[in-house]
Image (cartoon, rainbow, N blue to C red):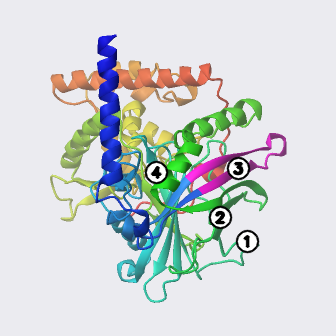
Amino acid sequence: MGLGLIALDGVVFLSCLGLSYVLYSPNIPRPHDYKTSPRAYVLHSITTHARLLPADSRHAFTYPVLSLILPLSALESARLSLLNGFLFSYGGTYGRILGLRSAKYLFDDGGKVPSIRTKLIKALDDFGVGDAEEQLDDAWILTMPSYCGYEGLNPLTVYFCYRKDNRRLWIVVLEIHNTFGERHVHILEVGRNEEAPNANFDHQWSFPRAFHVSPFNDRLGTYTVSVRAPFSHSDSDVALPHIRIHLNNPTGDLKFSASLRAKHVAPFRTLTVLAALATHPFILFLTLPRILRQAAVLHYRRHLDVYKRPEPKPVSWSVSPSHSPALAKGGGIGWQHPTILERAARHFANAFLARRAHALGVCIKLRPSDPSAHVQHFDAGTDGADGKFRELVISYLSPHFFTLLVLAGDGPTALRWGGSGGPSHTTGEVREFLVSDEASFREVFDIHESGGATWPARVLRLLPDAACRHEQDVGGGKNPHPLMPESWIARIGFAVLLCALVAMEWAEELLWRIGRVRWAVIDSMERHPSGMVPVP
């Protein structure tokens, strides 16, 4: 009992001490300071999703959403901190109730760039908006903050960018995150490729879909985005922002609709933030659970099949001239991080490519689709007959390419599974990589060594999916695995990696069977994205 009273006294003492600091600290803004503090707002909104096709799987839901709309200039200068940063502050997530940090937004750089504005300007520049630094006056970010150290999924963050010369709305940037950890931006310029907006909206654009968000949709179709901005120009009174996205299938029928509509806006102040959190104390924890619940309803009750996640489309590969001009700028800005097994597979693949480049006199270039990843070069050891080097460019979509090389066991199988060697018949088997010369690729992986270890071929026959087994039996079992390292110590590591990858394939297969997951059959247009060719 005595220890309990002492602990209670300590809690009361610390609470009174903290309350006194909040009430009497000279650094905390008082009500009379609010007239001169920067404008920022708390938004009480609703989000509505409605699936219209197929007709027998119709489904809709509506949830309340709590979000903030803040000017980046005031946010990053710490002029929006509340209660000395304890209630809200920029630059981190821990040690505060609400927070924002740059690492969660735009390019996935691990927080190396501390400014969201700097990253926004880089995105505008990278995707073809010239002189963004000189033209951008300020940008308002509409987003959900972290809550008590928890950074939930932000499916949609919107940036309203205003010009310096006339302080009017210039660009709307939609930053989309999916549940797989990938990020994509659409850059919509006011007055460029715009359509006549529907009632209650100020602007509207339509453009092809390119990013995998829902596992119940392929990447075909067209988005129509309608926007009502919070300000017509940066000095105008605040309005209730409204974002609506329609997804039309390739025949033009409305398949899916989503909207985020503000119902009430309040000044971003200590009391209004506390009131919002008191009204919805758990709302910032619920985004991902809500998504998972609705996914279960769609799959098990509405009987929608699942599309396996395709890798994000590359932003650094060229598009054939037959492709129509881009109606909206943007592209991928965040990829999945490589797993431990993918990093290990990349290590063995790099060592193999370095050996083969030197032995064959071929310059090999590994080009990732992720612009933040480095292009790798493997130099040839000798000149060709004409004094020039041959070059092989391998453009890959994700680090999964390296585990594919390990599991394929030879060049033709790798091309058949993930390259352009032939069509696939199940969802998700889109091309993982493209090569500038298939003959050179086959030559690089064509290993003929007498007395080499052939046990990897027997391990690969244990892969669970019969459709993915080796049609040519991995060289008939006569040739060693091409990625097999030379030293015995390294071979032990390669054996562990190969067995681990086969075990992971089985674990994934069993997980899908236990969950009774039904896979959709992918459309040929999605399976072979038209127009993508590797750039030397």
Dot 4 lies on which element?
Answer: loop
Drawn side of residue 217 relative to residue 231, left or right = right
Say which residue appears at 76% left-offset and 73% top-offset: 199
Drawn side of residue 187 relative to residue 488, left or right = right
Q: Earlier in the sequence, mark 3 or mark 2?
A: 3
Residue neighbourhood size for the residue with mark 1, other residues' Cα within 10 Å, grouped as few (<14), some (14–19), many (≥20):
few
Residue holding disc 2? 242
Residue neighbourhood size for the residue with mark 2, other residues' Cα within 10 Å, grouped as few (<14), some (14–19), many (≥20):
many
Residue 309 visible? The answer is: no
Q: Which residues are magenta?
A: 44-66
Q: Amino acid at mark 2?
A: His
Q: Amino acid at mark 1?
A: Asn
**Which image quarter holds the N terminus?**
top left
Residue 145: mark in rendering: 4
Give how far across and how far down residue 313 sits, in percent. 49, 55
- For the residues labelled 4 and 2, the Cα–Cα distance comes to 19 Å
- For the residues labelled 4 and 1, the Cα–Cα distance comes to 27 Å
Q: Is 60 one of the magenta-colored residues?
A: yes
Give how far across and how far down residue 397 sits, in percent. 43, 50
Give how far across and how far down residue 415 sits, in percent. 46, 43
Against 63, residue 124 (above or below) is below
Q: Amino acid at mark 4?
A: Pro
Q: Earlier in the sequence, mark 4 or mark 2?
A: 4
Residue neighbourhood size for the residue with mark 3, other residues' Cα within 10 Å, grouped as few (<14), some (14–19), many (≥20):
some
Say which residue appears at 31% left-offset and 21% top-offset: 7
Residue holding disc 3? 49
Against 232, residue 382 (above or below) is above
Q: Amino acid at mark 3?
A: His
Dominant SS in magenta: strand
Q: In which image quadrant can residue 336 be found?
A: top left
Residue holding disc 1? 200
